[in-house]
Image (cartoon, helix red, strand yellow):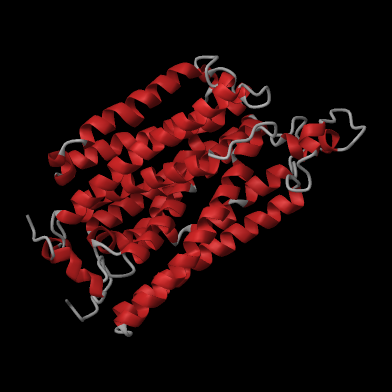
Amino acid sequence: MATTTLSRSQVPQLNRLQLFGIGAAVIGLALLALGFFINPQVFLESYIFGFYFVMAFPLGCLAFLMIQHLTGGAWGVMSRRMLEAGALALPIFFILSVPVVLTVYNFLNLDLFIYQWSDPSVVTPGGENFDPLVAHKVPWLSPAWFAARMVIYFVIWSGLALLLRSWSLQQDRGAKSLAMVDRMRKLSGIGTALFVMSVTFFALDVGLSLDAHWYSTMYGVHYMVNAGLGTLAFIILALTQIRHTAIFEEHVPIKPIHDLGKLLFAFTILWTYVSFGQFVIIWSGDVAEFTPWYARRIDGGWVYVSLLLMALSFFAPFLALLSRGNKRNLNRLAQIALVILFMRVVDMVWVILPEFHEQVTQISWVNLAAPVGLFGVWLAIWAWNMQRASLLPLNDPQMDSLHAGGHH
């Protein structure tokens, strides 16, 4: 096991990814800003969609980072710096959450409230649009408590990400290795419990409450599984850019890549189980308040998006990942990961945009500008953070697990 600290990583591919992220951020956010002047309401709807989608990546990185500290394994040691780099974007995304919070306060004085429960006439008895079912969910669904929860979420997530990164770098600089491993494992144990609760409520707040009449206990789980799938797919694609660096050639065999392929396979099955399970439970229950959510995603051409999800989010990757050879070949695994990553966009379109568009043909370029721009921001931050430390935590005792299975 190496005991020296490497200098910061200087990988041309990471520089290119950073520039690509900056370009996507500039183009996407510029188009989104143009959309603001065309139609402020569509701008806000698109921003909510883009923010909700892209937040899955730093959150997915944080989740797998804590899982790695709890479980160990070669895949986690190989991926740790990539996971840390992604999670470190969370403080920046706290700032990017401000437009969502302001939307709840209707800061643009729109005639139609995007979040119905934030309309005083809906939750005030005697109001013009009073809805007793929505009013019953106050004070949880109230602008002030929504904003307070958003602060709580990001304090938890940012604190976990910054502490784990700081301790990992201290380990690189020669701090007592076993003591640091124990410290990071204990924090990850507590952090995982906080993560599951906070991300569940975050998903309910930003996504599910767009339809204040609907409720599903699996909604938060679905979001976390989507985050896991998207993060794994991104990590695999990122590996294609750094796999042939000297440090990876020396220390990383095929085994941890195979492990990532198996995780991707497992999360593909889990996504299918959660998605179909939620549908079966709600549809068979046939409760008047719940079934319209799915009815909107069948009418207006949305059923074709559902069929696409079945074909390319389950059947195609499931069959492809059954092959051991595909999971051990990074190039073929990356092709599968690219399809899975694209389908995360499609899945989030299907979950969020029917709340704004009855017809799938009503999706506009403004709707897609926000995810492009915000993902570009996250990618640029990820690539920048990747170059602030060595690509592998060489002073970690678990580095030995990378070589346990050999290089073949």
**Residue 282: x, y in percent?**
57, 27
Q: Residue furthest left?
A: 408
Q: Left or right of 224: which side holds 247? A: left
Q: Position of residue 356 (x, y in %)?
A: 61, 27
Query: Which residue is most to the front?
Result: 285
Q: Is residue 292 left or right of residue 337?
A: right
Quadrant where the image shows the N terminus: bottom left
Residue in the picture at 29% in, 57% down: 15
> Does residue 365 appear anywhere in the picture?
no
The residue sitting at the right extreme is 126
Q: Which residue is more in the foreground, 284 or 136?
A: 284
Q: Is 151 in front, or is 39?
A: 151
Q: Residue at x 35, y 54 (%)?
A: 18
Residue 275 in view, yes or no: yes
Location of residue 379 with respect to 47 vertically, above or below: below
Q: Front-most of 373 and 407?
A: 407
Q: Residue 268, position in %: x, y? A: 34, 38
Residue 240 drawn at (x, y percent)? 21, 49
